[in-house]
Amino acid sequence: MPKRRNITADKRDEFRRRLLAWYAEYGRDLPWRNTDDPYHVLVSEIMLQQTQVDRVIPKYHEFLEKYPNVEQLADAPTDEVKENWKPLGYNIRPVRLQMIAREVQAEYGGTIPDTPEELQKLKGIGKYTAGAVSCFGYRKAVPLVDTNVDRVLQRVFFGKHASESTKDEKQIWELAAELVPQENAYDYNQALMDFGATVCMARKPLCLVCPMQAICAAYPISA
């Protein structure tokens, strides 16, 4: 990644303003956005790893009907949990999710930790998932960076194109932390992921209708 450019407070503010305005009009109505239960958020995040949203939605509802809380998932037979995960694939994920539930039950009395630092102590939870559960389950103003977020931030602030990969993860996380508003962090982080998934896509980004045109260092993108 090239040396970091001077990113002004005005650009950070304008980016947040444009992003939240876009999200207010175009944000997706997803079931895990209608809960403040950190366990439900955790289930959705594990399911969404390497699986498209439209495939996750029905299984998310079905799985939570079967295992509505940490205790019931922790106590269930592992083979049964794996069976109830089908057909999402990547069947190590339900095993990992149940291991997290069992650790939470044993070490935290069934209450999922609320900070990224504590969440990352749980085996199977990485930096992104820890941020997502902390923000979406507890409304903490913390950063989170997935593939979509990484791509948006690199394009808007560093002029990176789709063919150029992240060279400095630490730099992106630092920028993400600077951008998260202390208020409305939930909507901001949801907006950032939605924007990367539906507008600032890896292939064929919708630059001609993008609200970031005036401030994007990579505009126009040829992809």
Image (spheres, helix red, strand yellow):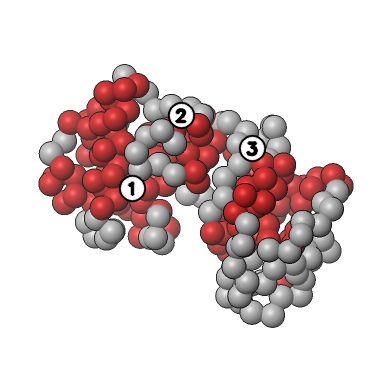
Q: Quick check: 221 left or right of 37?
A: right
Dot 1 or dot 3, earlier in sequence: 1
Residue at left offset 42%, top offset 58%: 53
Residue at left offset 47%, top offset 39%: 130
For label 2, count other residues whose C-alpha is less than 10 Å away and answer few (under 14), some (14-19) or many (20+): few
Dot 2 or dot 1, earlier in sequence: 1
Disc 2 target residue = 118
Tell me the quarter of the picture where residue 9 sits. Answer: top right
Disc 3 target residue = 185
Whether 14 is drawn above or below 196: the answer is: above
List x then y, in percent, for residue 7: 82, 51
Distance from label 2 to label 1 (Cα)? 25 Å
Q: Nearer the viewer, mark 2 or mark 1?
A: 2
The C terminus: image quadrant: bottom right
Which element type, helix, strand or loop, lies under badge 3? helix
Disc 1 target residue = 60
Whether 112 is drawn above or below 10: the answer is: above
